[in-house]
Amino acid sequence: MIHAAFLIPLLPLAGFAILAPFGRRLGNPLAGWVATALVAASFVVTVIVFVGLFQQAPAHRELTQSWFTWLGADRLSVDAGILVDPLSMTMAAFVTGVSSLIHLYSIGYMEHDEQFPKFFTYLNLFVFAMLMLVLADNFLLSFLGWEGVGVCSYFLIAFWFDRDEAASAGKKAMIFNRIGDAGFLIGMFLIFERTGSLQYTTVFARLGHVGTPSLVAIALLLFLGAVGKSAQIPLFPWLADAMAGPTPVSALIHAATMVTAGVYLMCRINPLLHLAPDAAHVIAWFGAATAFVGASAACAQNDIKKVLAYSTVSQLGYMFLAAGSGAYVAAIFLMLTHAFYKALLFLAAGSVIHAMDEDQDIKHMGGLARLMPVTSLTFLVAWFAIGGVPPFAGFWSKGDVLENAWAVTPALWVVGAASAVLTAYYIGREFFLVFLGERRWSEARPSGDGHGGHGPVAAQAVAGGPPALRRRPQDPSWHMSAPLVVLAVLSVFGGFINLPFHPSFVFLERWLDPVVGPALRRLHYSVGQEWLFGVVDGVIALTGVAVAASLWRRAVDRPAFEPRFLSAAWFLDLAEDRIVARTGTALATFTASVIESRIVDGAVNGVASLVRLFADWARRAQNGYVRGYALGIAGGVVAVVAYLLVRVVQ
Amino acid sequence: MTLNVSAYGPIVSTGLDSGQRAFPYLTALVLVPAGAALLVLLLPRARVAVVRAVGFAACTGVLGIAAAVLDEFRSGYGGYQMMSEHPWVGAFGFSWTLGVDGISLFLVLMTAVLFPVALASGMQRRDPKSFTFWVLLLESACLGSFLSVDLLLFFLFFEATLVPVYMLVAGWGHERRGYAAAKFFVYTFAASAFMLVGILALVFIHQSQTGVTTFDIRQLANTRLSGPANVLLFCAFTAALAVKAPVFPFHTWSPDAYSEAPAAGSVLLAGVMAKLGTYGIIRFDLGLFPHAVVELAPVLLTLGVIGIIYGGIVAAVQKDLKRLVAFSSLAHIGFIVVGLFALTGESLSGAVIQMVNHGLYTAALFILIAMIYERLGTFQLPKLRGLQHSAPVMAGVFTLVMLASIGVPGLNGFVGEFLILSGAFLTHRWWAVVATGGVVVAAVYLLWAYQQAFHGRPLPAAVSGGSDGPIGTGSADPGPPTGGAKAAPFREMTWREGLVLAPLVVLIVLLGVYPRPVLERITPTVNQLVLHAESAAHARIPALGRPGLTSYLHVAGAARTQGAER
């Protein structure tokens, strides 16, 4: 059963290979169904392999499948091969599972899009790349997946390429990711230099011979890669812009899967981080800081998706906080539950956006709960889950992270707890503004027929006022509702895979033990302390919920709580744009117009001009007068004779 | 012709000759296009179809022979194979000696692939006869350069490339073709003069030591050179080769020549001709003057790294697509230079495969740009917009080629870059680190160009809020509105055009996914070269144990030596 693992990435790749040439012919919705079926098949295979792995004794839960030597020269040799172990299978299971749901959802969401087949082509390619990332048995093949998901993310953010902001956002995502990737690459060079290999198991076995400074350098370089991919400080601005892509893309790539790749990488290199505690400390602090900055920025956004984008930034920060604290199980636990509730939030947001005719401003919404019961209820569940209200999924996973942060230093816990209050608050604000309160939209007179593609078509209805909708908002079709419900169930019960009450309930920890066990920070809290943490977490969550309710249940505008520095995400994007992009462009212009054409090429043309000057001067000798030439000849003869005489005399 | 080599026996000691094989593959490779060129010359000018058929048949034939060479090539062996050796001017030590090894094999194959593609892409309406003639002559000269084992023969072929290229640029180029062609010719020709002097000096030194006059590089490699002589000769050779490649700061002829040349000319200039320079560096600089190479490596590595960053930065603000690719070429050649002078097995193998890969994706880029030009009559990015709307297939192919050029793993560009950088990191860490920054810059200029040309709304009416800088997303100056009158929608790629690009696209993917067959043929030759260079360097500079050279490298190097002995 385990040996079927090679099919897991191959099935989505087959989907890509079918859809790239024939997608158009398959058309809408068949292309979508083909894509969905292949990803779902991949999920089934994953489950089978998962079960097969589970039946092995814990010590034997590791299998390497090597397909062929990918590239190598001299001492470097890298295989294309996959590593089947509890960590990679956990990742594969949730990636294929969430992907299947989002594929299904997309059939409904992209229904009216002209580029429907192309969307699924990219989506399948993305799933393939993501699976290569998590299944690869070496750094370089993971890097293939890593860049692959980045490229797919670029395609999908810029999917509606005729919108300039989408095109720019795609480019920005790719470039920010590339900055991180440069770190990843240099990290790999260092790993290769120090261990002579890039294969995970070999590298980890040889860590003993690598000096601590190198270990710290490697860890931080790989973390730089993770910072780019997982949108941490200072490289997170691309994720907010990435919301220009279709909403299922935001759910799948920019919430549930791709952006967690950095966290996966940190968990994968746990033996290395274990030996480089200084680097781990840096990671934890970056994570905590990002968690807070992201959460605070989310509090002041008015775009329904940007709230979620900054929320994702914040949640990813928590995951790095966990990984940096040596709590790899907590990081994976949060990653899983986050995938459920954040995908749910995005998908619910997507169905709201559809209902609102592509308007994404939450200040234009309100009162949708009655009209969209499924959407609003599932959103409510997701709110409680992300907020950490007991016993929803986030309560358990975030609690786990905070406990571990406390064990490192209470200061980390304080930052994390503050962000937790904000988390319950900002999604609450969004919930109240979108689903409750008065309706700040109006329905159009039922004359317009209301079909067509995207774009804020109805956005200019009443001067200055909110838009008039083409039809009354309602819950989406079953393609879109079914994933909402499944994800809602998972958001409620997802936390039960790792319960703290008894050692036999920590299923996830025991499952991941063969991979992360030796590096794991073990907590030694008494039962009383555990309960105390639980109660505090619950109070934190409920505080956030209560504050949100008291502030936003009736009000729409509270400028005091939406300060400019938060809605601009602490001005980081602006600063980077000013400092890096502007000066970079100016520098490039200067280099091209002055250094290149005046100096480098100027020197070449200068030599040519010198030659011409000399020639013009020398040309005067060729004046055509015989007497001149005769004089020259005579002079030459005299010189030669003189020379010979001198020689003879000597 | 090759025949009876077994009778000479040990004379051909450094070459692995297949005694019983009668067919002189390598000589045929060089002579078939030259012969076809002469044939074309005899054909009447009006018989366009026949001229084209002959030209294409010859190129395809060469590709066939090259494929046979690949088939005959014995992997796992580092020396020359399939030698064709014929004394020419015996007293002078000049001979027709051709051979192929792991370094030249894939350059020959790439040349054999790119010429038919270039010919097919650039079927000129004006005077196809002369065009075909010059292209065929150029192919002969390029193949001859890659295959020559005789230094003088190499030089003759190397110089012989200039005339056809000059003719192609000056005869079929764009507006400023005269300036570009003259600049190209004079610049590279002047630089070659240094090389000629270097060749003669080396041969005379060798003659004075051994009494044998020869241009055979296998024998010349054993010349004992004093330190200054080594450095001077290295500089003489490198002057010619660095201009040809081109290496920063000797590159300024290339944006002019690449952009003014016709499509086929740009393909061949950037794809094949540039590799003559880098090939010469690995073959002659590393083979003949390893001591100087080790000593001057930091200088050339620095030039390579500057080329990577500088080329990328200048490319980012180019408005002309062809000039953009020219500067991106400068950056990619920079990677090759870094790989060559880092002197590790990984980086050298990477440099060789990068020469091939760069040829493939740059050729594809120039062909795609030519397709845009055929439709819209411009290379200017500000005049392009939203092409993806009406030409999604072309956009898809452009994207793929662009990603290969950016160095996305899974496509061919990554393989060379990674090997180069990981190898360079072992001996010259900080150069490799800075060079890695080039991967970010590459993404900047190509994605920005793609966004301008392919993204956005196609109609000129809605240009207003469009452009930003190559990096940012803010609002900068909007590009000037497009010409306006272009009512006809941009035409999608035709089947014929697709067919021209297909071999390149297939190779770009194939070499990205499964480069192993290529690498395992390159590596033995490269390893031999590294051993040669290392032993020469150790013998002369005992203080090579610089901090960059890690102990790990020495251990593994020892292992490799043992492996080679086995």
Image: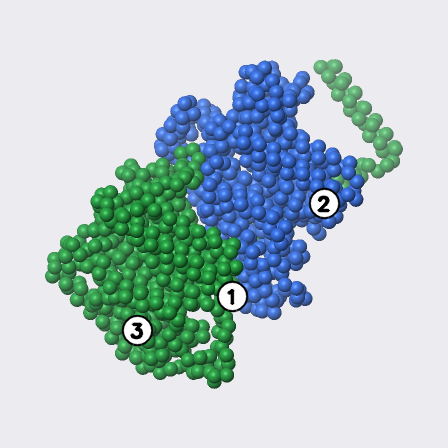
Residue drawn at 38 percent across, 28 percent down: B559
Residue annotated with mark 3: A377
Chain B colour in the picture: blue
Q: Quadrant of the C terminus of chain A?
A: top right
Badge 2 crowding class, 10 Å Cα cut-off, few under 14, some 14 to 19, many 20 or more, is many
Q: Secondary structure at mark 1?
A: loop
Q: Is residue B254 visible?
A: no
Q: How many marks?
A: 3
Badge 1 crowding class, 10 Å Cα cut-off, few under 14, some 14 to 19, many 20 or more, is some
Question: Would you place residue A281 above or below residue A116 in this image?
Answer: above
Residue drawn at 47 percent across, 53 percent down: A18
Nearest the viewer among A637 and A531 is A531
State the separation of the CA atoms marked 3 and 2: 72 Å
In this view, the residue farthest toward the right is A626
Camera-nearest label, 3 or 2: 3
Residue annotated with mark 1: A114
Q: Chain of mark 3?
A: A
Is the residue at mark 3 from the same chain as the one at mark 2?
Answer: no
Residue annotated with mark 2: B170
Residue type, mark 2 in image: Ala
Residue B232: x and y in percent read: 57, 29
Residue type, mark 3 in image: Leu
Residue B378: x and y in percent read: 65, 57
Q: Secondary structure at mark 2?
A: helix
Q: Secondary structure at mark 3?
A: helix
Residue drawn at 71 percent across, 39 percent down: B54
Task: From the rendered image, report the letter of the chain displayed in green.
Answer: A
